[in-house]
Amino acid sequence: MGDHTGDHTRFGASADGRASDAGDGALIGREADLARLDAFLTDVGHGGGSLVLLGEPGVGKTTLLTAFARRAEAAGMRVPHTVGVQYRARTGYGALRRLLTSTPDVRTGIAGMPVLAAALDLERAAAPGPEAVCEAVVSLLADLSRDRPTVLVLDDAQWLDPASAVVLTQVARHLAGVGAGLVCAVRIGDEGFFEHGGLPLHELGPLTEAASEELLSRRFPSLAPRVRRRLMADAEGNPLALLELPAALTDSQRSAGRALPSHIPLSRRLRSTFASRITVLPAATRHLLLVAALEGSGNLLVVRRAVAGRCDLKHLAPAERAHLVHVDDMTGRLEFRHSLIRSTVVDLSTSDQRRSVHRALAEAWAGVPEQRVWHLAQAAEEPDEQIAALLEETADISARRGDGPGSVAALVRAADLSPATAEQARRLAKAAYVGANITGDLRDVPRLLDHARQADPDADSLAATVAAAMYLLNSHGDVDTAHRLLSGAIALQSEPYDLADPTLLEALSTLLIVGVYGAGSRLWAAYDAALAKCTSVPDTLRLLRATFADPARARPGDWARLDAAVAALVETSDPVRIVRIGTAGAYADRLGAMEEPLLRTARGGRGGENNFPAIQASFLWGSHAWLTGRWAELRDVVGNGLALCAEFHYPLRSWTGEFVLACVSAACGDYPTARALADRMDQWGGSRRAHAIICYAAHAKTILALSRGDFETAHHHACRISPAGTLAPFVGHALWAILDTVEAAVRTGRHDRARDHVAAARKAGLDAVSPRLRIVLRASAAMACRNDAKALRWFAEALADEDAERWPFEHARIRLYFGERLRHGGALAAARPHLATAVETFERLGATPWARRAEHELRACVGDHLAGSQDGALTAQEYRIASLAATGLTNKQIGERLFLSPRTVSSHLYRAFPKLGVTSRAGLRDALDGTVLPR
């Protein structure tokens, strides 16, 4: 796969003598390049020509040439080949000799050509000029190709000796019509004597992201996903780097058991691939490159200040000419052509040189404390509390900005520089909780906490408790234990609590999350008591407590503050604030106003940064997509969040994503998937006393039962969230289940409970909280109402709301309920448009059971219209119900088939019996034999 630095006895050998691997995935992602080479083979057979493969070191030119040579030989062609050798580049006609003597029949042809024999020192004679040698080579190839086509293959043509390069350059331009070909590989940026200008070129670019991932997955299947992403980022599509970088990692680093170093060491083979272009540079240029590599951002003003007195930016010229770096004239920034060039520059330096450069960079960044302290930390040779303290301040800034990995790295380095063991332990514990709550590196938490305990076994750190509680919640611990740990640690802090301390703020935030999952008044009493002891409370904590923990008891002022916070999100890039405000607005339908920041935060996890906020943002957006009918997109975004949960071991957070997937599966009729997801939630939440997860499971099972027409089961599960007629305290999820609870109660004959549920929601002021809740409450009130006139008016008001169609699944359900009520009241013409719209919307969403149910109603509506013209005739619905009853089905079983309550089935049979002249189910079969339903 690589390019070469040594001589080769066989075409296709690597720099260290290993054969290049043209199989086992080495040509992944090279389909288009192979197609170009295949087309060139066809051209050779039709008359001849030349082709130059141009590419960076390690990009795979050798592997492609090897594959090309094999294909040419398989096609019956003669394939002489050689490789340019860097350290023999001054020998006369050395490469040409190796090329033309690499196959026996070509050697035989040379014997009859005195010019070539003399040029290649095979006979003693006066040395001919290059024109004569070129003419002789072309003549030789023409003679050989009369027997069978011949194609010359040259690798590393930039290292051909001058004499060979001049001749082969001319040969390449004279092969058209000869019946022979020449294909060669040339490195970008390496000056040589082979002049490829004007020849047909095919530039070999880096592998795509998909091809890079496939190559790594095939060759290193045990790599953890986040490690694979990091290696892909470092390799930038360079195949040699993709195959060599993993070799520098330990087994625990490959499996993500231990963190990767900030700079992955290069293998000997990889370093040698790039080193030759760097070691030949002047000392001043190499120093400039090292400063630029360690500075990192490409800021030439900083680089100039850091090299002042030793060299100048003009010394970059040799590196630019060698295509190692590029200076953007528009931005004035220096960019390395490839990250591996930067890594090689650093690898070729000594530790003393690197520390010296970091000290110079610290001075260059004197006016920017955050940058300055990082370079001071890298230059430090022994513990230094002053630098450690400054680095911790930088870590806090990074955490507030959402840069979790930067914050963790700064804290770990600050711990290394801490002279006092207590401070070292505290900073390591702090790194653990930042990793758990921002970066999403939960698996690193035990290691960091263990190192903290080793540093100071007697330390009692609040940060360690926060990290341990988060780890406990996501492993085998339970809500009560996590709450006891956190509340106990918080109680030990000095009063009044100052939430300017980020650790204490994070402790209270984690205690809030524990309360949300536990959903118990006792848990919230401890949280409220702690909050009352704070000198000031951030708006996010107040909003989460009011509008998310117990939204049914939030006050109008709380909703106003929430709206102001949502509106201000357009100005923030802090992923933690985005997800906290999003969480505060989830049950109140505010997520639609936050789509852009939520999706931006969700995408952040794909780059391997801020994974915990990315997980939360994915599921918040997924909840919004569930309610707004964007189910196809939902599966993609939520799927990414679940992949992060699995990768970083966050089962607690995964259930929100599992919940929305279960709901979509249930609504679409994928009952096995919905039930499996819900059962897993029930099992996990029950064993850990996490009531919020139990509510997720109950709601998914409610929708599943409603989709199947099993209304009694639906009522049972809906009441597990909050009993019908009440909105239980600290169960915010009840706001998402109002319509489901009311439908289940009405269809099981519990109209009083349904009316009480609507009344409880209105008493809580929920109809003023969001347009969706307003529409849902109007429709729920209509369903629960026995007065047809009022019910029809409330249905009409719900559907007339200008926001009604923003929530397509619930909108279609309301049209279905409205159509049913109209049909039962005999208003068939008015019912049909509502039912037809419901069918169309359900089908568009993929909600097959609901579409079938609406279609049944629509058909019955048409059938009723036809049957109504006959006095005493059965309606279509009565006929269907009577026919099913005649087979022995119970009212409940019939209701499940036709999406009716048992009481409705009973009413239809009550009206059908006198029309058929029977008094019991026993006579139905005979009575129906002579009954014909008009079509």
Image (cartoon, helix red, strand yellow):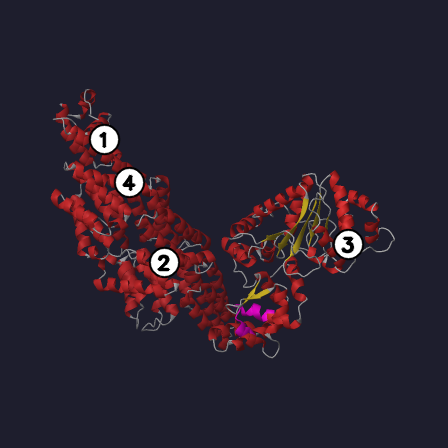
Give the residue at x 62% y 46%.
37
Q: What amino acid type is highlighted by mark number 3? A: Glu
- 3 and 4 marks in contact (CB < 8 Å): no
Q: Which residues are magenta?
A: 289-303
Q: Of the residues under marks 3 and 4, which one precedes in the sequence?
A: 3
For the image shown, how many numbered marks are present on the structure? 4
- Kindly report the distance in space between the C-alpha atoms of the residues bearing marks 2 and 3: 67 Å
SS at badge 4:
helix
- 4 and 2 marks in contact (CB < 8 Å): no
Report the mark closest to the observer, 1 or 3: 3
Does residue 324 lie above or below 306 as drawn?
Answer: above
Q: Residues within 10 Å of mark 4 (few under 14, many from 20)?
A: some
The residue tagged 1 is: 890
Q: Of the residues under marks 4 and 2, which one precedes in the sequence?
A: 2
The residue tagged 2 is: 596
Q: What amino acid type is highlighted by mark number 4? A: Glu
SS at badge 1:
loop
Q: From this viewpoint, which residue is outermost toward the bottom?
A: 309
Report the mark closest to the observer, 3 or 4: 3
Q: Is residue 407 left or right of residue 829?
A: right
- Residue 918: image tag: none
Report the mark closest to the observer, 1 or 2: 2
The residue tagged 3 is: 131
Q: Is residue 151 left or right of residue 854?
A: right
- Kindly report the distance in space between the C-alpha atoms of the residues bearing marks 3 and 4: 79 Å
- Residue 840: image tag: 4
Q: Position of residue 630 (x, y in %)?
A: 34, 48
Q: Of the residues under marks 2 and 3, which one precedes in the sequence?
A: 3
The answer to whether any part of residue 231 appears in the image is: yes
Q: Of the residues under marks 1 and 4, which one precedes in the sequence?
A: 4
Q: Of the residues under marks 1 and 3, which one precedes in the sequence?
A: 3
